[in-house]
Image (cartoon, rainbow, N blue to C red):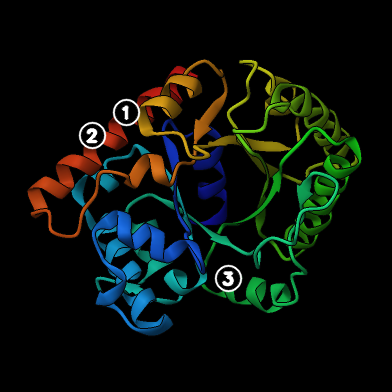
Amino acid sequence: MNTQEMTAKIRDGQGFIAALDQSGGSTPKALRGYGVEDGEWSGDEEMFAQIHAMRSRVITSPCFGNGKVIGAILFEKTMDGEVNGKPTAEALKDRGIVPFIKVDQGLADEENGVQLMKPLDKLPALLEKSVAKGMFGTKMRSVIKSANPEGIAAIVAQQFEVGNQIADAGLVPILEPEYDIHAADREEGEGILLAEIMKGLDALPEGRMVMLKLSIPVRPGLYTPAIEHPNVLRVVALSGGYSTDEACEHLAKNPGMIASFSRGLLQDLRKDQSDEEFDGALGKAIDQIAEASAAG
């Protein structure tokens, strides 16, 4: 797929984007969920080898290439690796799946009710490498903990500032100001977040495309104005700690949003499953998430 074909796939594709980008501190937890205990690896290289083996098994599963997964977000080491002897991005594109790369370097300490992204000092080199490897876009996460207008304005401003840098490099940024689903004031804060997002979108140059990855809102349909904005290629939803059933139930109430789930996709997969059991569990999740994305 070339850039034009990948753009059309993300804009018009019926399906969802798989989040396969657990990194750093979240990797051991992801491996435990998959049935790999801490004692089965020693050091970062062995840990990342285990998680790459899991992701390769997902990517090569017959159901992953059935057309319902239109994109996949990768961690840098996954992008740098191979799947069945091919660079991961190429292996995905061969299956009709558009590749994205996670580019943030973790979260700063909470201030004004939000956690901004840590300084992205490795970003220029990572963008250059990602373009060379044929990636289509990027993703970067920051987190909102409470309805603090100053904090929410700062988190959205940072997302758009870095997003413009990514777009200048020739990639499509997914802006992800996640709202903690456990926050007591989430409905109020999501209204503030939408207002700040719309300001950022309206300030973009004509023709500059971005994507948004947002928590499924308390009030269904809240993000419709962003979905309909001419500078937005697609709005995707994170599962945010919900189970697959919960995430799909909430997502189906939001027209125009499609899923970009991690836990909601992978929660029932285990290393010791037979290929038939693994493919069955993954296929069931893919079908359920695709159905919820189409309902929205």
- Give the residue number, with chain letter if any, for mark 1: 288
- Occupied quadrant, residue 44: bottom left
293 up-or-down from 75: above or below: above
The label on residue 130 is 3
Say which amino acid is labelled 1: Gln
Say few, some or many: other residues with alpha carbon within 10 Å of mark 1 (under 14 / 14 to 19 / 20 or more). Answer: some
Q: Position of residue 229 (x, y in %)?
A: 75, 28
Are dots 1 and 2 in contact, CB under 8 Å?
A: yes
Residue 279: % across, % down: 17, 46
Q: Residues within 10 Å of mark 3 (few under 14, many from 20)?
A: many
Residue 191 image position (x, y, % from top left): 79, 24
Q: Is residue 26 left or right of residue 103?
A: left
Q: Amino acid at mark 2?
A: Lys
Mark in front: 3 vs 2: 2
Residue count near mark 2 (Cα–Cα under 10 Å), binned few <14, some 14–19, many ≥20: some
The answer for how far apart the CA atoms under marks 1 and 2 are is: 6 Å
The image position of residue 270, as x and y in percent, is 21, 54
Residue that label 2 marks: 284
Residue at horizontal 72%, vertical 44%?
A: 209
